Amino acid sequence: MNSRTALYVQAIRGPVLLVTAGALFAIHQAGVLSFSRTWPLLIIVIGIMKLLERAWAPAGSGPVVQPAFRTEQRFAPQNQYRHGAGPDNPGQPPQGPGAVQS
């Protein structure tokens, strides 16, 4: 399947929905059917457009699913940070007039 076709279907989704809504309001104004009876057609058109997008989407273009946690990052190494140290200063003890030495 062609990714250009999927982009084309995605690009025309808004105009198709606008034309559908306009047709439903015209039917309502003509007195044929009230909008309260025809609005589910908008949901059907949205579903058809989403099906077409998925049908013509290139393989592997789905969302990337990350695992809940990675085992190699699950536990931080011991003594990685000492008192007063942080990501910017990983192993240095605190310095300066307000530093607390332990």
Image: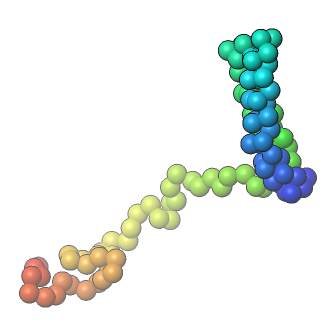
What residue sits 34% from the left and 77% below the top? 87
Identify the image quadrant of residue 24: top right
Q: Position of residue 16 (x, y in %)?
A: 80, 38
Residue 88, given in percent of the width and then of the height, sits at: 33, 81
Q: Position of residue 98 (x, y in %)?
A: 9, 82
- Left-right relation of 20 to 88: right
Decide: is 69 above or below 12: below
Q: Residue at x 39, y 67 (%)?
A: 76
Q: Is residue 40 visible?
A: no
- For image coordinates 30% across by 83% down, the residue present is 89
Q: Is residue 51 left or right of residue 100?
A: right
- Looking at this view, is 72 or 42 the one in front? 42
Quadrant position of residue 46:
top right
- Can the viewer see residue 91? yes
Measuring from the top left, give residue 28's x and y in whole percent. Answer: 74, 17
29 in relation to 46, above or below:
above
User: Which residue is at the front of the view, 62 or 39?
Assistant: 39
Q: How many marks?
A: 0
Q: Taking 3 as reference, is 68 left or right?
A: left
In the image, what residue occupies the spot 25% across and 78% down?
85
